[in-house]
Image: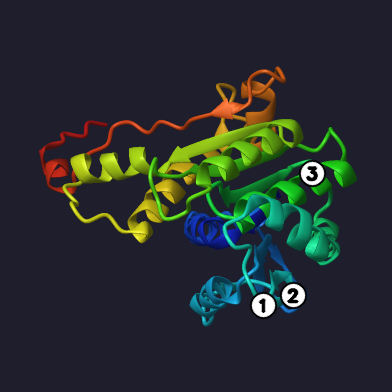
Amino acid sequence: MPITVALGQCGNQVSNCLTELMWDEGLRDSFFVEKQNGKYYARNVLIDMEPKVIENVLKKSEGKTWNYSKTAAITAKSGSGNNWAFGYSVLGDRNQESIQRQIRKLAEDADSVNDGFLVMLAMAGGTGSGVGSKTVEKIREEYGSKVPIIAHAVWPYSTGEVVVQNYNTLLTLNSLNCSTDGVIFHQNSSITDIIQTRFDLKNVAYSDINDYVAKELASILLPIKDTDGALHKMPIYQIAVDLCGSPNFKCLTPRSLPQLHNPKRAFLVISS
């Protein structure tokens, strides 16, 4: 039962898409916790220094068979100004006590935290990068080296609206390299190219990118059976052990094949 920590606009939107996929796949015991009232709640901590995105995420979950715990949503009145240093040193410190308190509550709902943490963020802005870096460092400090931490980081476009995005990205990369067991990267430009060329979608929106990224992550994080038929329910742990055995090997890039445009599926012949 991994704990998902979503930070910033991108981290929360991708995390929401991934959580919905995990519920649809029936992973109630892996990514959700059942309370005494019989309702299921996602094992997610939602963090953003602006309330708008998280408010939308919480609103979308209303009326569903699962929900987010509103006490696990942490927001502030103003953002991080697309500044890693302000997010890390100011807002990260200011809100860290409440962030870690919510993480502890989710950890107490599980038998253990050995399944690890999945931290989701973007590297260009201030909250995902700065507050995210501070949060990951505190998680590592509190839970030690035996609990695996895998980060999912979205690499920005080469050019964008954030003037200092290159500095934010570099500082975040250094922090994640020191504090996590591995980092799964998705590049906005690469995902946009794939969606445009493989799925004939010329005007790619961020929602399209979020959906695609969530599906790739779901294919990695779903429980799998080994050659002996044993079911592995701790994908975060397996990723950390199998792919990040050395401190020098932490950068991970997912690949999904084949990538087919929907009209071409009719020409596939599936044999049993």
Depth check, front residue: 222 or 131: 131
Picture coordinates of residue 14 (x, y %)? 49, 56
Label 2 Cα neighbours within 10 Å, binned few <14 / some 14-19 / many ≥20: few
Q: Which mark is residue 71?
A: 2
Q: Nearer the viewer, mark 2 or mark 3?
A: 3
Identify the element where label 3 is drawn: helix
Label count reads 3
Depth check, front residue: 72 or 158: 158
Question: What amino acid type is highlighted by mark number 3?
Answer: Glu
Residue 259 placement: quadrant:
top left
| Relative horizontal placement of residue 15, taking residue 201 as reference (left or right) | right
Residue identifier under label 3? 137
Identify the element where label 1 is drawn: loop
- Residue drawn at 55 percent across, 43 percent down: 153
- Does label 1 or label 3 sit earlier along the sequence? 1
Residue identifier under label 1? 77
Q: Quadrant of the C terminus?
A: top left
Q: CA distance from mark 1 to mark 3?
A: 24 Å
Q: Which mark is residue 105?
A: none
Q: Indicate whether 256 appears above or below 94.
A: above
Question: What amino acid type is highlighted by mark number 2?
Answer: Thr
Q: CA distance from mark 2 to mark 3?
A: 22 Å
Residue 39 placement: quadrant:
bottom right
Q: Nearer the viewer, mark 2 or mark 1?
A: 1
- Residue drawn at 82 percent across, 56 percent down: 107
Q: Indicate whether 56 appears above or below 151.
A: below
